Image: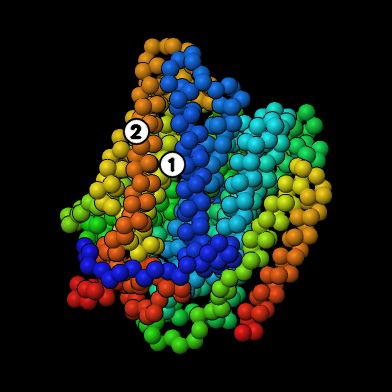
Amino acid sequence: MSTTEAILLGSATFALVVGATYWFLSHESAGTMMLLTMAVGLTIAAAYLRLVRRRASLPADRPDVRPSDVREPVGVFASRSVWPAVLALSCAACLTGLIYGWWLAVAGAGGVTAALVGLVQDDRAARSR
Amino acid sequence: MSTAAALPVPGPRIGLLGWLTTTNHKHIGILYMTTTLGFFALAGLMALVIRADLTVPNHPIVGRQTYAELFTLHGTAMIFLVIAPFGLGIANYILPLQIGAPDMAYPRLNALSYWLFLLGGLVVMSGLLTRDGAAAAGWVAYAPLSTTGSPGSGMDLWIVGLLMVSASSIMTAINLIATTVLYRAPGMIMWRIPVFCWDMVVTSLLILMAFPPLAATLAMLLIDRRLGGHAFDPSQGGSAVVYQHLFWFFGHPEVYVMVLPYFGMITEIIPVFSRKPVFGYTAFVLTTLAIAGLSMAVWAHHMFTTGAVLNPFFSAMSLLIAVPTGIKYVNWVGTMWRGSIVFPTAMLFAVGFLLNFLIGGVTGVMLASPPIDFWTEDTYFIVAHMHYVLGGGSLFAVFAAVYYWFPKITGVMLRESWGRLQFWLVFVGFNATFWPMHLLGLWGMQRRVVTYPALPGWGAANLVATLGSAVLAVGVLVFLWNLWVSLRHRVPAGPDPWGGYTLEWATASPPPEFNFETIPPIRSERPVFDLHHPRASS
């Protein structure tokens, strides 16, 4: 079991134990549900990591390897894109539209759609390079 | 400490469009930090007006509504727009460097997080421009004060703005965890990552558990206000107490979201200036995890006086947090013990953090006891406690971190002489401002009141607090002056001005676009020390 999985599973166990104790002592449902949801969420994350780790191991997890020993590229990193700023601005318009009028929310939703399309195209272009 | 240095490599000028479209973690880190500085200035000005208002009894200088807006926006800004995001901002810049990564795992998501944060903050503050004024229900916005009690659109803007900030924090947390898990340099196993990175991973986990309940609460609040919902309306089957449960299920872990990154920063600084490795690396990491876990189970100690929660359970869990926090003090003091300690400004602020946070921690232990909490609920004792934790603690660590990493980020040194002057002004000003509030609280002075009666001692204690806040403000002005002078008349820092231990000191200052030309072998949590002192490390 990797360190990350151990942390997630340990935290999930803690939340489960505290949640159960809290329920038996208080019979209060809001806090119990939140603690149990936390336990479930952490368990899902740990299970996902376990699943992924079967497919690939990282050079970072091998204590004796040197950085100069690894030749494969680290990853693909976007250099710049205008779409994150457009998406955030559109989200702001969409949400403030709930206060100032549906026209603003609709305009914001249009901006969100355009920005999402732009982000996907950005990603495709970066990966094809 | 080496001061010999080549001229700093000036980063390419990227222009306005460059800043708008950047996805580079270092640029985004700088954007975060400068934006939080702007919000800090705004929140600081609000605090000065609040203190001026309370200088003498029975003589308010602002109206009740304005006063309520001021303390609401001051608290909101400091918690959501300054202390927590500054930690995320510096993590954006430093964490990939410390683990030997070329960038964050998801650069565009990172940019989106920043823009959501900036725009969310501006939406919150835009309430000041509305006809009915800004939100005035306190930073906790309890229902029904935030529902039927706040009819103006300023409250709606507060909710919408914080929804955006919540989404931003969640995205940043995902990014920080993914970066640390996936992009560590070869050989940097998890038990070799710097303590600051550990603290950011744990903080990110806390964000992922605590911010979704906040987002859900804010969404329900907006539905109650705008779309006819009744989630928090007891007359229609809703529950105002559930609002408190949901809010504090976010709110108490949020305290540690605002503290753990700064524990990490201090734990980077103290060993370097004590010329020793951190004492008890493993214990430090495990206690960070313990604090995070316990912080998820203490939310209702903010609700002792509601009579709707199991006080002994939450009291016991809250008291337990003192144990891992105490162990951290053993780590810090043990690191300094018999070290060759030097005191540049960064170390002065780190020690200031230790002293102030200790006071905040001790009053926290007191407040974990329901009888004391009943006595001090909603008094200035609470104001003193939370400012010692978040101001005397986190804010001192902010300054420590700025003095420590400014040379790496800009390639130039901050002036030590101005830094020392700033430290003493801030230290004296801070304690003069907030120490008297302990007494005022125990004497029964309520918080969130625009004025107060002339009872024995109240006027004098408030006068001292106001004078202290003026000294504190002068300290902050000295800091701004130091930034200006240091950037105008540049003293080159070189790659490693402090004799640092972690990987960010193995590259140029400021670092090139993808951070490293070469990365040294990683055999411990101090790879740069190992590189420079192979005999000592073997």
Q: Nearer the viewer, residue B323 or B488?
A: B488
Q: What residue is shown at x 54% (from left), y 32% (from top)?
A: B71
- Residue sitting nearer the eye, B160 or B133: B133
Describe residue B253's horizontal placement relative to residue B126 as left or right.
left
In the rendered structure, are the residues bearing label 2 and label 1 in contact, judged by CB atoms less than 8 Å apart? no
Q: Residues within 10 Å of mark 1 (few under 14, many from 20)?
A: many
Query: What colour scheme governs how the chains and residues are painted in the rendered image of this protein?
Result: rainbow
Q: What amino acid type should be assigned to the residue bearing mark 2? A: Val
Name the kind of residue labelled 1 in the image. Leu
Task: Say the numbered circle drawn on residue B390.
Answer: 1
Chain letter belonging to callout 1: B
Looking at the figure, which quarter contains the C terminus of chain A? bottom right
Mark 2 → mark 1, Cα distance in angstroms: 19 Å
Q: Earlier in the sequence, mark 2 or mark 1?
A: 1
Question: Label 2 belongs to which residue?
Answer: B471
Visible residue check, residue B461: yes
